[in-house]
Amino acid sequence: MKIALGADHGGFELKEKIKQHLSKKEGIEVIDKGTNSKESVDYPKYGHAVANAVVSKEVDFGILVCTTGVGISIAANKINGIRAALCHNEYTARLSRLHNDANIIALGARVLGEDLGLACVETFINTEFEGGRHARRVGKIEQ
């Protein structure tokens, strides 16, 4: 599985923790799309970079982090074919995959602690899309 990571300055530290966590897992390749410091940057750049990697199939999933997760998820969702889900707990992470076939999880670094952020990522990448009635709904989103 290939996963692209992206964050602005507000999400940099949590992105780095997620990168460390995922890099230890067998069978996961992490592609870091930046940013690479806590210096102020504009989150759309990183939201778009990860979203484009997902749409082009360079990666299977994306993980985005900013201060709240809101701005970077909005930016990612501007790219056709992206279903970026802002998640605040394991339940929303699981349902975003199970029911919505989300291909990017967005997290708020100042909303979640490190442990909860990592738990959301684990839940997201380990949950399969349920399909069925949900596939019809996702299809309508894609139209």
Image: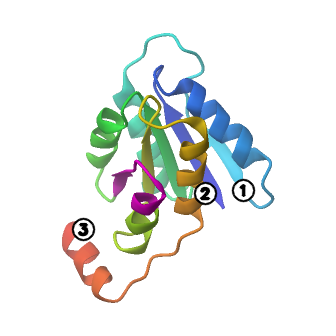
Camera-side residue: 39 or 109? 109
Pinpoint residue 51: horizontal percent, then vertical percent: 42, 47
Q: Which mark is residue 142?
A: 3
Q: Quadrant of residue 25?
A: bottom right
| Residue type, label 3 | Glu
Pinpoint residue 5: horizontal percent, then vertical percent: 56, 41
Q: Is residue 33 left or right of residue 23?
A: left
Badge 3 or badge 2: first in the primary sequence: 2
Magenta stretch in the rendered image: 82-93
Is residue 82 in view?
no
Q: CA distance from mark 2 to mark 1?
A: 12 Å
Q: Is residue 129 left or right of residue 76?
A: right
Badge 2 or badge 1: first in the primary sequence: 1
Q: CA distance from mark 3 to mark 1?
A: 27 Å
Circle 2 Cα neighbour tier, 10 Å, few/some/many (<14 / 14–19 / ≥20): some
Which secondary structure, mark 1? loop
Q: Quadrant of residue 138?
A: bottom left
